[in-house]
């Protein structure tokens, strides 16, 4: 019991020191599923991952800004030596559409002695309503539409990256839990064996004092007790460190740190087998939802958009612009002519680099990236399949090892019981009894280790799918 008091004192001092820095609640019990739900809800790393989608949404908003209506207004005035040279005011409202058309509403008023004749307008000003259309390059797609489509893809990529970060946080948290599980049960097991050694030492010492046993037997019992004292104290430190590591994953609703209670215990791990079709289920889920596969597919889609844009840029730039004109006295009318054949302004522009080397170079570079993406997609798919399959194979092996180790523990218990009977009958020695017990302790610790390793391997298998929802779905089953 002294080792138990030793552990409680150290843990109390450590947690008290931490609480002196930040007040916190404590948890009395901590089931594995509850623990994972708490990590998923409140862990700072998970909260940081949520911000990735917020960042992507902000970038998507920026891309949509390319289609924002835009108001511009220019005013120029010049007066020199008492003469008003010009008083020009020109304002426009431009509305980009998702098709290669821009709507435009403008108002201009030009007055003064030296106004350029082509800029002469009625005294009340001139209104114009028109459209600007790209008829060759930019007709199928253009940079602003490509940017918006890619921003939507990057939002999906951010969700995949978020999923990856959450899976990693859950995996690390799961490993911390099962390390605590092993450290706790190791400590309890060694405490029980230390108490057994202390009881035997007192019994042997009394027998020595009564003259029923030789003094050397009490030395043998004392050595066994001291050895187990050392092991228990080391286990106490291991448990303390495991709890401190586990506490890093425990947070409250207000992001305040939560600490395990001194009396908190991990859940009991019972026998569990794998479903026959779990491998196919996990592989199917991974092929659809694994973040790396999702990202590489979305990257390929973004490259296809680039390819489409650069291929379209091989065409000449040709723009047409048409504006209806009107002043305040006459609404948009054509006079004696039809509406679209009088009081209008028409413009056209064409340009085309002769060698098109810039566009051809971008197109060729994009095609290379697409080929690389196809290879990356094939390798990533195979890598994910291999990782999940290897994790599944490891779980099957650990299940077999657990059965074998449980059988070994049963046999060691039979050996210990038999050796104790022989010792009570005077047919054995205390050395042999201690040796048998030590082997039994080693076997039990090894069984604990394999069970903890199996649970960690199961967590790694879930993490290999890249889908955080699988963790809680499987634990619900």
Image (cartoon, rainbow, N blue to C red):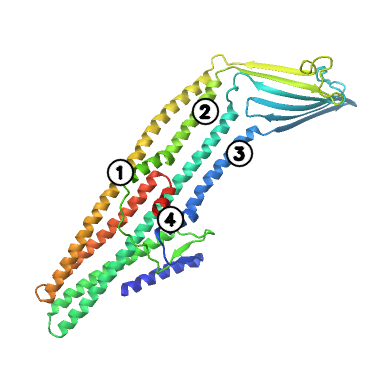
Mark 3 falls on what kind of element?
helix
Question: Quick check: can you spot residue 379?
Answer: yes
Mark 1 falls on what kind of element?
helix
Q: Name which quarter of the figure residue 55 lies in.
A: top right
Q: CA distance from mark 1 to mark 4?
A: 24 Å
Mark 3 and mark 2 residues within 8 Å of each other at the beta carbon:
no
Residue linked to disc 3: 61
Mark 4 falls on what kind of element?
helix
Q: Is residue 75 above or below residue 242?
A: above
Residue 23 tag number: none
Q: CA distance from mark 3 to mark 2?
A: 19 Å
Residue at the image point whose x is 44% and y is 35% from the top: 296
Is 317 left or right of 36, judged from the image as shown? right
Residue linked to disc 1: 390
> First in sequence: mark 3 or mark 2?
3
Residue linked to disc 2: 305
Mark 3 and mark 1 residues within 8 Å of each other at the beta carbon:
no
Q: CA distance from mark 3 to mark 1?
A: 42 Å
- Please identify, in this view, whether the residue under mark 4 or under mark 2 is nearer the observer: 4
> First in sequence: mark 2 or mark 1?
2
Residue linked to disc 4: 36
């Amino acid at each position: 019991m002294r080792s138990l008091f030793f552990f409680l004192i150290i843990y109390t001092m450590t947690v008290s020191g931490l609480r002196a820095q930040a007040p916190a609640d404590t948890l009395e019990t901590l089931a594995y599923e509850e623990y994972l739900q708490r990590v998923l809800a409140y862990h700072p790393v998970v909260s940081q991952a949520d911000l990735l989608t917020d960042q992507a949404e902000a970038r998507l908003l920026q891309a949509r800004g390319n289609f924002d209506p835009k108001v511009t207004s220019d005013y120029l005035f010049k007066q020199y030596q008492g003469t008003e040279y010009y008083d020009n005011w020109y304002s426009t409202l431009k509305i980009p559409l998702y098709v290669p058309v821009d709507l435009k509403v403008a108002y201009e008023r030009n007055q003064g002695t030296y106004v350029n004749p082509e800029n002469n307008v009625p005294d009340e000003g001139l209104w114009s309503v028109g459209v600007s259309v790209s008829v060759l390059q930019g007709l199928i797609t253009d940079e602003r539409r490509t940017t918006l489509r890619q921003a939507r893809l990057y939002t999906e990529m951010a969700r995949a990256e978020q999923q990856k970060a959450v899976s990693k946080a859950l995996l690390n948290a799961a490993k911390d839990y099962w390390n605590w599980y092993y450290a706790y049960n190791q400590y309890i097991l060694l405490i029980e064996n230390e108490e057994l050694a202390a009881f035997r030492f007192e019994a042997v010492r009394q027998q020595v004092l009564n003259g029923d046993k030789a003094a050397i037997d009490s030395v043998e019992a004392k050595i066994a007790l001291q050895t187990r004292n050392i092991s228990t104290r080391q286990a106490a430190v291991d448990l303390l460190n495991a709890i401190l590591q586990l506490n890093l994953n425990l947070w409250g609703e207000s992001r305040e740190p939560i600490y395990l209670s001194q009396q908190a215990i991990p859940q009991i791990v019972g026998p569990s087998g794998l479903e026959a079709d779990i491998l196919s289920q996990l592989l199917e889920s991974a092929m659809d939802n694994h973040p790396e596969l999702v990202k590489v597919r979305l990257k390929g889609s973004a490259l296809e958009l680039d390819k489409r844009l650069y291929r379209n840029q091989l065409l000449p730039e040709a723009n047409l612009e048409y504006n209806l004109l009107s002043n305040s006295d006459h609404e948009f009318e054509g006079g004696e002519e039809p509406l679209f054949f009088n009081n209008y302004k028409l413009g056209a522009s064409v340009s085309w680099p002769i060698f098109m080397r810039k566009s051809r170079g971008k197109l060729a570079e994009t095609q290379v990236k697409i080929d690389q993406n196809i290879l990356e997609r094939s390798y990533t798919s195979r890598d994910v399949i291999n990782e999940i399959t290897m994790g599944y194979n490891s779980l099957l092996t650990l299940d077999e090892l657990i059965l074998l180790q449980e059988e070994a523990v049963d046999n060691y218990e039979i050996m210990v019981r038999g050796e104790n009977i022989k010792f009570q009958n005077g047919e054995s020695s205390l050395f042999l009894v201690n040796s048998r017990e030590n082997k039994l302790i080693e076997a039990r610790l090894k069984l604990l280790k394999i069970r903890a390793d199996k649970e960690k391997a199961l967590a790694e298998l879930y993490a290999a799918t890249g889908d955080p929802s699988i963790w809680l779905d499987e634990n619900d089953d």
